[in-house]
Image (spheres, rainbow, N blue to C red):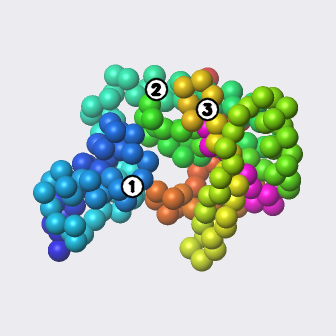
Amino acid sequence: MVSPNLRDQIAFQAARLIVDSGLQDYALAKQKALKVLHLPDNSELPSNQEIEVKIKEYLLLFHNDTHADILKSKRSEALNAMLFFEQFNPRLVGSVALGTATEFSPLEIHIFTDSLKDVTEFCLAKDIPYRLLDRTIKLNKKTKLSIPLICFIAGNNDVELSVFENQNIRQSPLDPATGLVQKRISISQLQTMLS
């Protein structure tokens, strides 16, 4: 069994890798942290929630002078994207919503429509080159759902639009990092945060 102190060190190293290297995959960050600390692969790993806490601590300790500017810039760009896709009831999620964004963090936005074609045609009409992928999300601990993911670049940011059916606007999925219900921020809420 790993001591609480060692588990804390693993979480801190994983957080450092996420912030400074742009890793988005928490499982990979944990494995790399084990290597940095010269620990065996079968060591007991911290939860993603523990890593989220350490990301906040790490940003405060080592990026306090720049983090606020990066976060404000990311949130401003997210607001622009959300206003652009306003007809699809966008909601900001992920690290930009939570306040743990780094310069590498994508703008993660949930949009809602009963026709994926409406979104793809909107993108084509606005000359937005995009990639269409699939993302598996957990609606709850038992239900997984495969949804379309529209990816493109806006300025210096990767934008990821998760396309949900209109009925899913009231049920936020589980956050892939923490396993908790994902925080969704509306346009008006984001405007308030930025003012």
* The C terminus - image quarter: top right
Q: CA distance from mark 3 to mark 1?
A: 23 Å
* Residue at image location 57% in from the left, 35% down from the top: 158
| Numbered tag placed on residue 85 in the rendering | none
**Residue 138: image x %, image y %?**
60, 66
The amino acid sitting under disc 3 is Ile
Which quadrant of the structure image shows residue 125?
Answer: top right
Mark 1 = which residue? Answer: 26
Closer to the chain start, of discs 2 and 1, is 1
Closer to the chain start, of discs 2 and 3, is 2
Please identify the dominant SS of the magenta region: strand
Camera sees residue 192: no
Q: Magenta segment: does it hold 111? A: no
Q: Nearer the viewer, residue 31 or 171?
A: 31
Which mark is nearer the camera, 2 or 3? 3
| Numbered tag placed on residue 70 in the rendering | 2
Q: CA distance from mark 2 to mark 1?
A: 21 Å
* Residue at image location 60% in from the left, 24% down from the top: 155
Q: Is residue 68 above or below residue 146?
A: above
Mark 3 = which residue? Answer: 153
Q: Secondary structure at mark 3?
A: strand
Q: Is residue 79 left or right of residue 22?
A: right
Magenta range: 159-168
The crowd level at tag 1 (other Cα within 10 Å; few <14, some 14-19, many 20+) is many
